[in-house]
Image: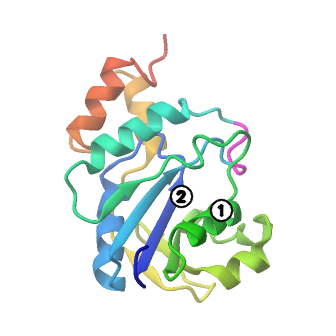
Amino acid sequence: MISSQNIGLFGGSFDPIHHGHLILARDAMEKLGLERVIFIPANISPHKLDRPPVSAALRCEMVEAAIEGEAGLFCDRCEAERSGPSFAVDTVRLMMKRFPSARFFYFIGEDNVADLGTWKEIDDLRGLVSFVVLARGGFSNEGGFPVISRNVDISSTNIRNRIADGLSVRYLLPDSTCKIIQQYRLYRNE
């Protein structure tokens, strides 16, 4: 059993993971005094049902490749292996069983703050975690949550579009992630 620690939970599609995710995760770890940050790729995001992502297994593989050798960064496949949409409250309850004495910080993107009230069992979730907003610049904090902010103009959508258009994504995501994208010919318009 692990003693009391501060753990960051970073859920999301990670379709694909990129340097913006990694920079903000490391910043949060340092600024909040976290012993670990756990990336949790969603099987299906309940807020992105209109766009099917790359398979959860491949997104987990990309996350694992991106964080390999990075102290304190981990990937957990619990949501990827669960059927149906992934809900934060279910994952947090699972993490509480695994790390019973931990304090949890749940990372949300600035684009998710406005819809936070629609999350499954949000009132219970608010009692289980401290929300932390990861912002990539220009965020006005109206929710009163702690904010980790970096002016990073990188998005998974832009990366997918660049790949589909045959443009380079070098320097936007780790080389190990690029190799997986190339190996499986992901995000191409073929």
Q: Which residue is mark 1?
A: 88
> Looking at the image, which is closer to me, 146 or 8?
8
At label 1, the amino acid type is: Ala
Q: Quadrant of the N terminus?
A: bottom left
Q: Is residue 47 left or right of residue 147?
A: right
Q: Position of residue 178 (x, y in %)?
A: 28, 32
Q: Is residue 169 visible?
A: no
Marks 1 and 2, the one that precedes in the sequence:
2
Q: Is residue 7 above or below residue 165?
A: below
The magenta stretch spans residue 138: no
Give the CA separation, mark 1 to mark 2: 8 Å
Residue sitting at x 59%, y 69%: 97
Residue sitting at x 30%, y 73%: 27
Magenta-colored segment: predominant secondary structure: loop
Q: Position of residue 52 (x, y in %)?
A: 64, 32
Q: Which residue is mark 2?
A: 11
Pointers 1 and 2 in contact (CB under 8 A)? Answer: yes
Q: Position of residue 147 (x, y in %)?
A: 46, 81
Residue sitting at x 62%, y 85%: 142
Q: Is residue 165 left or right of residue 117?
A: left
Q: Is residue 76 left or right of residue 162?
A: right
Q: Is residue 28 above or below residue 68?
A: below
Q: Position of residue 64 (x, y in %)?
A: 34, 44
Say which quarter of the image contains residue 25: bottom left
Secondary structure of the residue carrying numbered label 1: helix
